[in-house]
């Protein structure tokens, strides 16, 4: 059994013992030292004995992590292997180098760790020692030497002396780093000294020689490359949907998540991480692609979609990725209108034949795999335990929904009819089987197994997040609705009841807004925590669960700046990283599929495009965001056929105003904040359904103000 076996939704590999991360701001130059650390270093004080750099190295099952199971990523878009960054300014280079670089000056004192500018892949570690404020900044940049492309890590140890006397601080840099400047060890009172370094770390999967020391120095200094790195990533971010939200941390997490996804990517391969899960997995790739297209990133879409067919066609560990392969194609076609590319791949396999299935092949695999009782999907290991899992039937329904949409768009009426018949048949079988299970065991929730109560399988543990598996991995109730799926049965009727059931079982065991985690030691939360709120968008009372779950992740479970293990344990108070951070984790951190789920549910909560042309605005916006004086904005959002629009939402007293700009919507706008339900008095435009809290606007309307009976 290889490293990659048995590592997903309910049982990943152990990868750490303790973890850390926070959003606390870094110690800026000139800021006073923390009260609990020395500020009395004297002139020409003897340097501390040479220290060891903070640990950042492979641990259990080759997962790379720091002393407190902390891990993040730096590098470049599409690099061969990203670099794992750890607390304390240390980083681990892969790409055959397999070496840790770090600084002995770091001493495990109270530390902040953050992304530069809040979201860039330049990680800043800040702490105090010898009375000085010290920060270590590491980032990757691409450079070309003699026609060969490389990624280099640029590193700066900045020492600011806020005292009235000089201090002496040696970064204690490791051998192998190339010095880029000559900086004194003695720092005068009120002064700042920067020590700059560089090391080549990646060759984009090629084997040409590494650049020489002279070539690295000639390629420019830290500041020059920082400017280039910042401009590059800001340019990449400009192509996707932009957000301005009352919670600025969510905006930074959204932006950094997009960047981490590109760093984890190796050429055309959408790896799940740079750490441990540095490979493609079928359902991961499908989810990552769907999110990228939802955000509006279509760069290399053709190559990524065709690469994905080899992943879903050859990986037998998880069958659900094969069944849902049509979904990212449907999102891509809806957003871009690129019918020619879809038609070319609709019924045509890749060059390797069956191991690179066509879209049609993957849909027909669903029918072949309906080997369970009564015509439901057969047994799988899709939640890392063998069984007749509820998520499988809903994922298959999602795949058929997406396939029907594609068949209709390419004009294959026979396949569209087949997909409709299969969908109706599978939905009937799913509902019949679940109704029987619910009746037999007198359940008031949607079970994670089609044929057993939760008490009879792994979901008996309230902290096992698989109790909510259909709400994320099933996709159907929310994402299926966006493509016109007919929704009926327990999967739609019991959403609210199942959230209530799951959270009631967790009361007193875990904090609010975490779904739980996976065995054996990581039941606190997971990188999917926000994504578990996806079906909440189809509910009555949990429409903001995705955003609340995302905020929980930011506040309590980061193991690197905006980086999360697939599953994590409770916070470790002994970590030097200031804040609330896990004591351990499993999987990969950052975790690309978890990031994709979090960012998609965040965006869907704000704006979602339906295949019939309707645009849904505000479906999952928390009430706290529509209190008087609050505002939010979305721009560059892809709708249909290459069109983009934006909107602002602002609240004054008991009135909420929506203003749209950019391309006109391709259908009606459904303005439906949770705060509107049973609370609408009047509107300046459109028609009102007060019971559902929906104001329906014609595409020509650009501004509407909704007056509420009660301010939020």
Image (cartoon, rainbow, N blue to C red):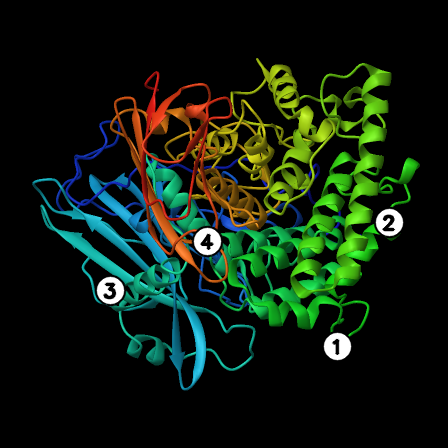
Q: Residues within 10 Å of mark 3 (few under 14, many from 20)?
A: few
Most foreground residue, 28 or 170: 28
Q: In the visual, does 677 lie left or right of 301?
A: left
The image's mark for residue 369 is 2
Q: Is residue 644 above or below residue 699?
A: below
Q: Secondary structure at mark 4?
A: helix
Q: CA distance from mark 2 to mark 4?
A: 34 Å
Q: CA distance from mark 1 to mark 2?
A: 25 Å
Q: Quadrant of residue 350?
A: bottom right
Q: Is residue 497 above or below residue 153?
A: above
Earlier along the polypeptide chain: callout 2 or callout 4? 4
Q: Secondary structure at mark 1?
A: loop
Q: Quadrant of residue 375?
A: top right
Instruction: Give percent across and percent down for residue 422.
Output: 82, 48
Q: Secondary structure at mark 3?
A: helix
Earlier along the polypeptide chain: callout 4 or callout 1? 4
Q: Residues within 10 Å of mark 4 (few under 14, many from 20)?
A: many
* Residue 207 can be seen in this image: yes
Q: Residue at x 55, y 47 (%)?
A: 610
Viewport quadrant of the C terminus: top left
The image's mark for residue 258 is 4
* Residue wearing tag 1: 351
Q: Quadrant of residue 685?
A: top left
């Amino acid at each position: 059994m290889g490293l990659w076996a048995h590592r997903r939704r309910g049982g990943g590999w152990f990868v750490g013992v303790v973890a850390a991360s926070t959003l606390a701001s870094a110690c800026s130059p000139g800021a006073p030292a923390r009260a609990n650390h020395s500020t009395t270093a004297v002139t020409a004080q003897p340097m501390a004995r040479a220290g060891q750099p903070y640990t950042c190295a492979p641990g259990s099952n080759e997962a790379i992590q720091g002393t407190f199971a902390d891990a993040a990523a730096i590098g470049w878009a599409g690099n061969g292997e990203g670099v794992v960054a750890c607390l304390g300014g240390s980083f681990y280079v892969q790409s055959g180098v397999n070496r840790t670089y770090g600084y002995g000056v770091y001493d495990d004192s109270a530390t902040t760790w953050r992304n530069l500018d809040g979201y860039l892949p330049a990680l800043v570690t800040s702490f105090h020692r010898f009375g000085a404020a010290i920060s270590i900044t590491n980032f990757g940049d691409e450079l070309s030497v003699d026609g060969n492309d490389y990624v280099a890590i640029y590193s700066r140890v900045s020492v600011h002396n806020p005292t009235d006397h000089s201090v002496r601080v040696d970064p204690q840099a490791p051998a192998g780093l190339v010095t880029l400047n000559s900086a004194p060890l003695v720092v005068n009172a009120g002064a700042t000294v920067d020590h700059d370094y560089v090391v080549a770390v990646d060759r984009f999967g090629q084997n040409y020689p590494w650049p020489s020391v002279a070539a690295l120095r000639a390629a420019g200094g830290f500041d020059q490359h920082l400017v280039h790195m910042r401009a590059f990533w800001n340019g990449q971010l400009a192509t996707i949907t932009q957000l301005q939200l009352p919670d600025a941390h969510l905006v930074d997490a959204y932006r950094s998540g997009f960047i981490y996804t590109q760093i984890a990517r190796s050429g055309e391969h959408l790896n799940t991480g740079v750490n441990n899960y540095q490979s493609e997995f079928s359902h991961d790739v499908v989810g990552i692609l769907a999110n990228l297209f939802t955000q509006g990133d279509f760069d290399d879409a053709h190559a990524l979609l065709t690469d994905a067919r080899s992943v879903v066609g050859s990986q037998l560990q998880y069958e659900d990725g094969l069944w849902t392969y049509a979904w990212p194609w449907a999102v891509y076609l809806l957003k871009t209108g690129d019918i020619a590319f879809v038609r070319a791949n609709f019924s045509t396999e890749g060059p390797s034949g069956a191991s690179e299935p066509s879209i049609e092949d993957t849909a027909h695999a669903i029918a072949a795999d309906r080997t369970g009782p009564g015509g439901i999907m057969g047994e799988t290991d899709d939640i890392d335990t063998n069984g007749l899992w509820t998520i499988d039937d809903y994922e298959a329904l999602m795949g058929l929904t997406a396939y029907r949409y594609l068949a209709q768009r390419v004009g294959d009426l026979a396949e569209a009819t087949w997909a409709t018949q299969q969908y109706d048949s599978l939905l009937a079988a799913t509902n019949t089987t679940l109704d029987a299970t619910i009746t037999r065991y007198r359940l008031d929730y949607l079970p994670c197994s089609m044929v057993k109560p939760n008490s009879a399988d792994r979901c008996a543990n309230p902290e096992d997040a698989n109790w909510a598996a259909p709400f994320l991995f099933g996709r159907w109730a929310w994402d299926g609705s966006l493509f016109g799926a007919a929704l009926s049965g327990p999967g739609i009727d019991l959403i609210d009841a199942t959230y209530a059931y799951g959270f009631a079982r967790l009361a007193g065991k875990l904090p609010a807004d975490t779904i739980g985690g996976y065995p054996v030691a990581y039941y606190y939360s997971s990188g999917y925590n926000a994504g578990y709120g996806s079906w909440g968008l189809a509910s009555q009372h949990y429409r903001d669960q995705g955003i609340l779950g995302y905020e929980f992740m930011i506040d309590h479970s980061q193991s690197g700046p905006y980086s999360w293990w697939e599953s994590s344990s409770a916070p470790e108070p002994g970590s030097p990283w200031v804040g609330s951070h896990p004591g351990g984790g499993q999987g990969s951190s950052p975790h690309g599929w978890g990031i994709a789920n979090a960012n998609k549910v965040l965006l869907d909560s704000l704006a979602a495009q339906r295949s019939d042309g309707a645009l849904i605005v505000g479906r999952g916006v928390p009430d706290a965001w529509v209190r008087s004086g609050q505002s939010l904005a979305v721009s560059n959002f892809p709708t249909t056929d290459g069109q983009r629009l934006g909107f602002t939402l602002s609240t004054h007293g008991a009135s909420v105003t929506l203003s749209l700009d950019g391309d006109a919507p391709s259908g009606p706008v459904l303005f439906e904040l949770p705060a509107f339900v049973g609370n609408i008095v009047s509107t300046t435009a459109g028609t009102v359904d007060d019971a559902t809290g929906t104001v329906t606007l014609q595409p020509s309307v650009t501004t509407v103000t909704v007056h509420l009976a009660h301010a939020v």
